[in-house]
Image (spheres, helix red, strand yellow):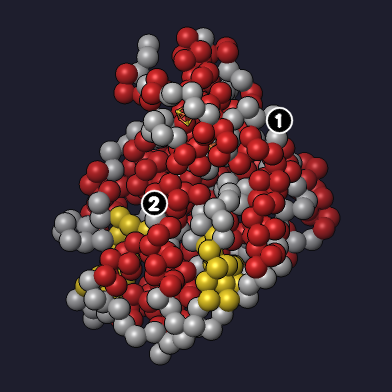
C-alpha cells in the first residue's frame, strides 16, 4: 500500500536539476543520479520491490539534490528509505564497527595510544583492507585518551553553576572520543559570552547507523536522545547546541523525516552552534575579540547547507578581527560519514572530493575551516592542510 504521507516523488517535474547537482553522478557511471534513483523509480519499487536497482547504494545521502530541487522532493530521503526497505540486510563486521561509534569509542579511549599506533601501521592497514574491505589508503581519526564527558565533569562542571544563563551541549561522538579540544573550546567561547554549559545523557545521534542500515538502533538512539534533551530543556527559553553540523542535522531533520520520530519537543530549542552564537551577537552579546591573524579557507559541509546554516558560520567568522577568510565554492568533500571508509566506494569518494581539494590547493591557506568532523578527516587526509572548527577560531579570539 502507498504511504500517502510519503509521496513527495509525485511532485517531481522532471527538470533534472538534481542530477546536475549530484556530486556522485558527476564522477561515476555506476550511479544514474537522483532523478532516476529517486522519484523516477520509487513508484516502480512501490509496485514491485524486485525492480530495485543496486546503483542506489552509491548515493551518499549528502542532500545536495534536495537543496537544488525546485519542487521540494525529498529525493535523498526516498533513496535512503528504499535502501532499508528493499535491500536484504547482510551482516558485515566492518559496517557494524563503523556505525557503532559509542561502542568503538568507549573501548578505544582506554587504549588510545595503542589503537592509534596500530591503526597507522602498514601491515595492519593491509590486513584491514584485505579482510574487512577498509581501504589501506584511508587514514583513521585518532582517539583521545578518556572521554570529554569525564574531563567536563572533573574540570568544568562546577564552574558552570556560576552562570545565570546556561545551554545544554550535545557534544556528539567526535568530541567525546576523538577531539576533546573542540568541546573545551566551546566551553571557553560560551563562558566568555557569560553563558554556562551543561551536558546531559546522550547517545550517538545515529548518522552512521542510518548510513549503514541499522534503522532499529538509530530509532532507539533517537528516542533516547529526544527524551534526554527534552528533560534538559523543560523551560521554553532553554537552548541545546551542537558543534557537529551532522549531529544537528540528524537531531533536527533526519529524526523527523527519515526515522519518523516526533522531535517537536526539542526542534525549536536545538541549534548548530554558529546559529546560536549568531543570535547572541545580534542581541548584543558580543564580547571583544583579540585578532586571529591567519589566512583560512572555509568549506561549507553539505548538511549545514541543507539546514541553511552556512550564512551564520560565515557571519560569525567575519567578525573575528585579523581573520582573512576565503569562502570556497560549494563542493562535497566526498567522505559522507562512513562511505569513504569502504573499499567499494573509496575511489568515488576521492573523486567527489577532488574538485574541493584542488580549490584548497589554489588558495594555499594557513588553515581550512569547516563545521563537520568527517569533512575535516577527508580534507586533512587528502590535502596538506590542518582543518579547524569555527569554535576553535572563536576560542582563540576570546582567550584571555
Ligand atoms: S543525496 Fe547526494 S549522492 Fe544522493 S542522490 Fe542526492 S546529491 Fe546524489
Ligand atoms: S530537481 Fe526535483 S523536480 Fe527536478 S527532476 Fe529532480 S526531483 Fe524532479
Name the residue at 47% across, 69% down. Answer: 390
Q: Could you give the CA–CA distance between mark 2 and mark 1, rounded to whole angstroms?
A: 30 Å
Q: Which mark is residue 399?
A: none
Tell me the quarter of the image containing the N terminus. top left
User: Can the viewer see residue 149?
Assistant: no
Q: Secondary structure at mark 1?
A: loop
- Label 2 residue SS: loop
- Residue 45 at what x, y percent from top left? 51, 15
Q: Quadrant of the C terminus?
A: bottom left
The reply to whether discs 2 and 1 touch (Cβ–Cβ < 8 Å) is no
- Labels 2 and 1: the sequence-earlier one: 1
Q: Is residue 313 above or below residue 184?
A: above
Q: Nearer the viewer, residue 280 or 140?
A: 280
Q: On the image, numbered disc 1 is attached to which residue? A: 29
Label annotation for residue 308:
2
Residue 175 position, x and y percent, is 49, 64
Q: Residue at x 59, y 30 (%)?
A: 33
Q: Position of residue 203 (x, y in %)?
A: 42, 51
- Depth check: 143 or 285 in front? 285
Q: Is residue 174 left or right of residue 238?
A: right
Amino acid at each position: 500500500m502507498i504511504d500517502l504521507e510519503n509521496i513527495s516523488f509525485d511532485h517531481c517535474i522532471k527538470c533534472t536539476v538534481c542530477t546536475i547537482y549530484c556530486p556522485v553522478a558527476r564522477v561515476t557511471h555506476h550511479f544514474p543520479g537522483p532523478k532516476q534513483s529517486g522519484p523516477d523509480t520509487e513508484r516502480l519499487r512501490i509496485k514491485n520491490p524486485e525492480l530495485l536497482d543496486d546503483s542506489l547504494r552509491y548515493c551518499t545521502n549528502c542532500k545536495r539534490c534536495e537543496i537544488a530541487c525546485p519542487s521540494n522532493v525529498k529525493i535523498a530521503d526516498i533513496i535512503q528509505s528504499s535502501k532499508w526497505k528493499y535491500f536484504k540486510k547482510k551482516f558485515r563486521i566492518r559496517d557494524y564497527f563503523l556505525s557503532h561509534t559509542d561502542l568503538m569509542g568507549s573501548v578505544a579511549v582506554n587504549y588510545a595510544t595503542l589503537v592509534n599506533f596500530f591503526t597507522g601501521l602498514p601491515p595492519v592497514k593491509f590486513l584491514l583492507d584485505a579482510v574487512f574491505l577498509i581501504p589501506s589508503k584511508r587514514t583513521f581519526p585518532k582517539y583521545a585518551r578518556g572521554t570529554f564527558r569525564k574531563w567536563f565533569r572533573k574540570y568544568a562542571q562546577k564552574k558552570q553553576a556560576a552562570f545565570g544563563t546556561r545551554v545544554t551541549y550535545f557534544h556528539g561522538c567526535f568530541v567525546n572520543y576523538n577531539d576533546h579540544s573542540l568541546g573545551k573550546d566551546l566551553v571557553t567561547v560560551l563562558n566568555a559570552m557569560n553563558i554556562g554549559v551543561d551536558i546531559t545523557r546522550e547517545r550517538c545521534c545515529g548518522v552512521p547507523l542510518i548510513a549503514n542500515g541499522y534503522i532499529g538502533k538509530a530509532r532507539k538512539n533517537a528516542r533516547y536522545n529526544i527524551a534526554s534533551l527534552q528533560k534538559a530543556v523543560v523551560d521554553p527559553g532553554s537552548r541545546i547546541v551542537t558543534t557537529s553540523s551532522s549531529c544537528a542535522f540528524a537531531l533536527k531533520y533526519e529524526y523527523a523525516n527519515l526515522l519518523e520520530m516526533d522531535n517537536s519537543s526539542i526542534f525549536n530549542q536545538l541549534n548548530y552552534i554558529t546559529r546560536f552564537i549568531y543570535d547572541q551577537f545580534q542581541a548584543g552579546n558580543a564580547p571583544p575579540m583579540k585578532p586571529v591573524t591567519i589566512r583560512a579557507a572555509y568549506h561549507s559541509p553539505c548538511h549545514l547547507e541543507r539546514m541553511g546554516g552556512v550564512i551564520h558560520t560565515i557571519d560569525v567568522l567575519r567578525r573575528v578581527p585579523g581573520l582573512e577568510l576565503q569562502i570556497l565554492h560549494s563542493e562535497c568533500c566526498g567522505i559522507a560519514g562512513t562511505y569513504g571508509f569502504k573499499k567499494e566506494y573509496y575511489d568515488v569518494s576521492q573523486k567527489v572530493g577532488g574538485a574541493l581539494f584542488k580549490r584548497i590547493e589554489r588558495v594555499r591557506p594557513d588553515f581550512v575551516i569547516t563545521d563537520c568532523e568527517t569533512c575535516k578527516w577527508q580534507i586533512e587526509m587528502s590535502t596538506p592542510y590542518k582543518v579547524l572548527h569555527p569554535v576553535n577560531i572563536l576560542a582563540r579570539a576570546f582567550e584571555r
